[in-house]
Image (cartoon, helix red, strand yellow):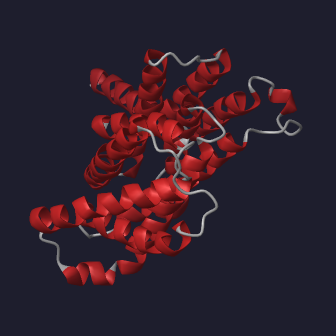
Amino acid sequence: MILANLFWAGNFLFGSLIVNEISPFWITFLRWTLAAVLLLPTAYFFEKPHWSTIKNEWFYLALMGVLGIAGYNIILMAALEYTSAANAAVVSALNPGIIVLFSFIFLGEKLSKLQFSGLIISIFGVMVILTKGNINDFFLISYNKGDLFIIITVVLWTFYSIIGKKLTTPPITATAVSTLFSVLLLLPFTFVVDRGISNVSPLSIIGLIYMVIFSSVLSTVLWNISVRGIGVNKSGISMNLTPFFTVLLTIVLGEEIIKEQIIGGIFVLFGVYLTSGLLDQRFKIMKENKQMQKY
């Protein structure tokens, strides 16, 4: 999960650079078409999938392709045309909290009062970022379109993760097949977009290659493996590392970080820590230790 989040951090940075030269549709289509070429043989040789399982779960795999591959990435790239990589990463840190909430609603997983409080705190942190500290004007100001797009990607990725948890198809195979579905879906739309590819620089080519290998193939496979191994909630908690890595890389590259991003990010991360249930577990362990000491 640490590697997956590091690779996603690079996705925010390279995406914000190349979206000015390649349209969101073309970025998504190219990177995932190339990713499918790598994923399909990898899945075949390493997991030896049973095609009957894929046949039985084809609808859910296709839905994962629509939500988590096509929808998520197109909207993310579109968002980076209007907002900074750091802002996008910090707002997307709300994802773990939303995953916990939706897991409670759709999967019946427990949600304590402390976890719910953490979710509210995280939302407050996002409000600080969206309003640049002017919370009183939350319903009055005109929002950055990119930040609102990022909130949509949070919801899409949450559903992608929940669906992935319920499948029996092996993780690499699930990623490969859902990627193939997304590419087939994108094919007719990609060639009718207004802006395609123009004046592509060497940096954009490098960025696209990075996004194919690291942000598309390795990160998604690692994510799906982690979801199967440690669950949706615990995997979601690790997504706190994405904004941390993104902001760190942004500072290294010389981009300015405003105080509202820092303050809002602190609220988001603290809220997600509460929502993760880690504090609940610590209180439970302390309570059990006290009971044992009595005996």
Is residue 24 left or right of 235 when viewed as pictured?
right
Quadrant of the rendered structure where residue 242 is?
top left
Outermost right residue:
140
Quadrant of the rendered structure where residue 279 is?
top left
- Image spot of residue 110 (x, y percent): 48, 51
Identify which residue is drawn at 50% across, 50% down: 99
Q: Out of 42 and 295, give the one closest to the viewer.
A: 42
- Image spot of residue 116 (x, y percent): 59, 41
Q: Out of 141 and 107, give the one closest to the viewer.
A: 141
Of the 4 image quadrants, the one containing the C terminus is: top left
- Image spot of residue 30 (x, y percent): 40, 58
Above or below, 54 against 103 in this view is below
**Residue 104 visible within the image:** no
Identify which residue is drawn at 48% across, 30% down: 243
- Image spot of residue 175 (x, y percent): 31, 62
**Residue 191 visible within the image:** yes
Above or below, 246 against 157 in this view is above
Q: Out of 107 and 267, give the one closest to the viewer.
A: 267
Identify which residue is drawn at 47% across, 53% down: 27
Q: Out of 175 and 276, give the one closest to the viewer.
A: 175
